């Protein structure tokens, strides 16, 4: 028995994910190649395998000079790694990407990187080496500053390797703005285009810019002169003029880019916002940025966000991947958290989940990189620590219902799995589920519940209930449905067999007016839901919006022309409340105020909510920024413009969002409550008084 347990422990040890490496000094930069990982600290350059085993190390210090390596770029096509630093008035060298101790080329007296500890962008653009940085060589009398340069990568190119000379001049982009900070940049392969993102600061304003160039051009000057640019604005609720991190989202058509913007107010719980933009057709110029020798330097062109998908106090890093029509975002924060956020094809965000939280509040570097082999892990840096964190957590869901409720497009239910993995998993990724059915969420699952249903009137006495399970499958799993009322089978047996994911049940009209228990069985998994069925023609409410909601949520048809609830005619896709009742938006509930809106973490009873159209509100929903399961509180003392409820206790301090919930389970309105410490009292004045007094005592308290 002991040997058996020891074997299990060894097996589990081999399967632990989320490896950690602690270095002697702070990590300055790191890059990921196709087969290697390169980590730069103050004194050493480390070559590592993707599973974080060190293979080589290179000392980057000098006996008499302090060398600060500030550029690290893999050139996979050439099998090399380019590093540049400050030793000998600046140098660059080309290393063997498979063995960093093997130097292929070295050149001194060229300052490609920065002297000071500032941000830069560097990558391979076409066949050249592109670097964006602030001009440190500017003189007081200068009015134009070099901000982007193209450098040769071989002796056969103009000027030889590590030269930025072109046909008659240097290959640079100039600016009338000296105070620039480059945040990110990337090279698009097809078509070959280079994108750079930077913050520009003048005496009058801050702004975020995107620069785009055609990297397929053969000559440096042609690439530089293809410059197009635009100002990027964020956001409608408040100005956030500083870009802190960004990533490009893999897309078949166009170029979708995500940027994390800051209002630079760390006390604001929504100081930073993550917004999406279409940058595939950046056209025009921005004032003050042009190719060398060009005058004037353009006029203003602006980009507005496609969608703002997340707000938080301190986003510091972002990375993205795609799974079919889904976008999966990973956000690093300044308090050491890694957050996962899923977006559907309309950029609607799901609930954020925390994949990792550091023990202390160590800020992450603005770069995160996926492990390129399987994209199931991501590298993050916390000062001296490099972590490889698993971004797939399917195995924590033990039932099909929980697996689907996670709304994670990577996770699905593996039917009859006999996985050879060390941990037996039934909620798994698709590649872990071979030769069997993989049941997953459909692409519109962020807007739909697990079950939806319709009712059609076949005759004056017979009703058919059509149930749809909002699931997809790669195969044909065993599937069945049962409908009972008070433990008695409701269906009359005239319906065809259920076919995944839909089934139906016909019954007589007199059976209608109570709740029906619907049980869906997929292989060995049973999911039971209570359906509230009503006579469609008899659904009436004081509010047209409430009547429409009750009509659609009861599986009936809402007639927009007569504003009346009717039986559906023939089965088909069920209408969504959002579309069927949208023209009644003026009657939707609104929140005007909460009294009080600041409470201790112990909660508060008898809170007054003022608003409009509150008759249909069934409960209050309270959600923190990173809470996937909100707190809910029932409503009492309801009227059209006021209602009362209890604020539940909270385990943490901070601001939470409050909305009112209607019978369709939709949230309306957006107010906030702040949880803080309990009030403390410092004294009572006066401390002595008469038994009867008209003078009010004073109690001095503070939050």
Image (tube, helix red, strand yellow):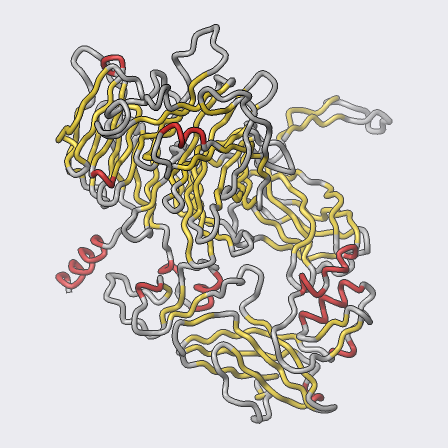
Q: Position of residue 679 (x, y in %)?
A: 63, 33
Observer-nearest of 646 and 85: 85
- The quarter holding residue 534 reads bottom right
Task: Give the residue displayed 39% in from the left and 14% down from the top.
Answer: 136
**Residue 641 placed where, x, y %?**
81, 51
Q: Is residue 254 left or right of residue 92?
A: right
> Residue drawn 26% across and 36% down?
74
Vertical order, 477 against 170 (above or below): below
Q: What x and y, as percent, mark residue 89?
A: 26, 13
The residue under the point 73% across, 42% down is 595
Residue 14 vertical placement versus 562 (above, below):
above
Q: Quadrant of the C terminus?
A: top right
**Which residue appears farthest toward the front when viewing the image?**
168
Observer able to see residue 18: yes
- Name the quadrant containing residue 449: bottom right
Using the image as rendered, state which of residue 523 and residue 159 is in the foreground: 159
Q: Is residue 294 above or below residue 405?
A: above
Q: Is residue 326 left or right of residue 168?
A: right
Give x and y (percent) for residue 501.
49, 76
Of all residues shown, which one is farthest toward the right?
A: 694
Q: Is residue 144 left or right of residue 83?
A: right
Identify the residue at image location x=24%, y=61%. Answer: 422
Residue 651 shows in the view: no
- Up-down: is 301 above or below 429? above
View extreme (top): residue: 141
> Picture quarter containing residue 457?
bottom right
Quadrant position of the N terminus in the picture: bottom left
């Amino acid at each position: 028995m002991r040997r058996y347990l020891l074997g299990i422990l060894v097996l589990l040890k081999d399967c632990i994910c989320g490896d950690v490496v602690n270095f002697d000094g702070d990590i300055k930069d790191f890059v990921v190649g196709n087969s290697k990982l390169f980590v730069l600290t103050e004194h050493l350059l480390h070559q590592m395998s993707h599973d974080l085993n060190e293979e080589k190390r290179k000392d980057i210090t000098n006996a008499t000079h302090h060398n600060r390596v500030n550029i690290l770029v893999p050139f996979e096509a050439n099998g090399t790694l380019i590093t540049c630093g400050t030793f000998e008035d600046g140098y660059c060298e080309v290393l063997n990407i498979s063995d960093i101790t093997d130097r292929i080329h070295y050149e001194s007296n060229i300052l490609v990187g920065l002297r000071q500890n500032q941000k830069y962008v560097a990558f391979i653009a076409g066949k050249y080496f592109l670097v964006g940085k602030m001009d440190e060589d500017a003189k007081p009398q200068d009015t134009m500053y070099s901000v982007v340069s193209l450098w040769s990568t071989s002796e056969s190119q103009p000027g030889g390797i590590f030269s930025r000379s072109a046909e008659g001049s240097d290959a640079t982009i100039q600016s009338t703005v000296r105070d620039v900070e480059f945040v990110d940049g990337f090279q698009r392969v097809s078509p070959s285009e280079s994108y750079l993102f930077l913050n520009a600061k003048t005496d009058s304003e801050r702004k975020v810019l995107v620069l785009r160039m055609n990297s397929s051009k053969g000559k440096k000057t042609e690439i530089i002169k293809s410059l197009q640019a635009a100002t990027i604005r964020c956001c409608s609720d408040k100005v956030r003029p500083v870009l802190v991190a960004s990533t490009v989202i893999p897309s078949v058509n166009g170029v979708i880019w995500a940027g994390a913007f800051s209002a630079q107010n760390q006390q604001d719980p929504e100081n930073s916002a993550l917004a999406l933009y279409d940058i595939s057709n950046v056209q025009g110029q921005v004032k003050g940025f042009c190719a060398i020798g060009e005058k004037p330097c353009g006029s203003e062109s602006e980009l507005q966000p496609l969608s703002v998908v997340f707000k938080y106090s301190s986003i510091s890093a972002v990375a993205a991947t795609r799974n079919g029509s889904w976008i999966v975002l990973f956000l690093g924060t300044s308090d050491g958290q890694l957050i996962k956020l899923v977006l559907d094809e309309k950029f609607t965000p799901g609930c954020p989940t925390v994949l990792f939280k550091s023990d202390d509040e160590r800020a992450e570097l603005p770069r995160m990189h996926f492990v390129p082999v399987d994209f199931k892990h991501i590298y993050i840096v916390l000062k001296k620590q490099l972590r490889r964190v698993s971004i797939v957590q399917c195995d924590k869901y033990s039932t099909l219902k929980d697996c689907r409720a996670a709304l994670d497009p990577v996770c699905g239910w593996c039917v009859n799995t006999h996985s050879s993995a060390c941990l037996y998993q039934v909620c798994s990724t698709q590649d872990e589920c071979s030769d069997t059915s993989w049941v997953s969420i459909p692409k519109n699952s962020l807007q739909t519940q697990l079950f939806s249903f319709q009712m059609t009137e076949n005759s004056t006495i017979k009703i058919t209930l059509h149930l749809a399970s909002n699931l997809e499958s790669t195969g044909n799993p065993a599937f069945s449905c049962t409908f009972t009322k008070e433990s008695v089978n409701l269906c009359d047996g005239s319906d065809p067999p259920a076919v995944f994911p839909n089934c139906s049940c016909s019954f007589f009209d007199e059976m209608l007016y109570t709740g029906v228990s619907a049980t869906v069985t997929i292989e060995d998994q049973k999911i039971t839901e209570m359906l509230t069925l009503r006579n469609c023609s008899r659904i009436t409410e004081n509010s047209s919006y409430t009547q429409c909601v009750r009509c659609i949520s009861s599986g009936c048809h809402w007639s927009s022309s007569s504003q009346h609830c009717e039986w559906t005619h023939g089965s088909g896709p069920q209408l969504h409340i959002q579309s069927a009742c949208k023209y009644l938006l003026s009657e939707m509930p609104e929140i005007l105020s909460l009294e009080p809106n600041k409470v201790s973490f112990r909660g508060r009873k008898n809170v007054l909510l003022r608003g409009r159209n509150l008759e249909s509100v069934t409960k209050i929903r309270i959600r923190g920024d990173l809470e996937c399961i909100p707190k809910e509180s029932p409503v009492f003392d309801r009227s059209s413009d006021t209602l009362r409820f209890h604020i539940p206790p909270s385990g943490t301090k901070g601001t939470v969002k409050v909305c009112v919930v209607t019978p369709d389970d939709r949230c309306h309105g957006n107010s906030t409550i702040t949880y803080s410490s309990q009030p403390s009292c410092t004294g009572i004045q006066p401390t002595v008084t008469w038994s009867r007094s008209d003078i009010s005592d004073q109690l001095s308290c503070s939050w």
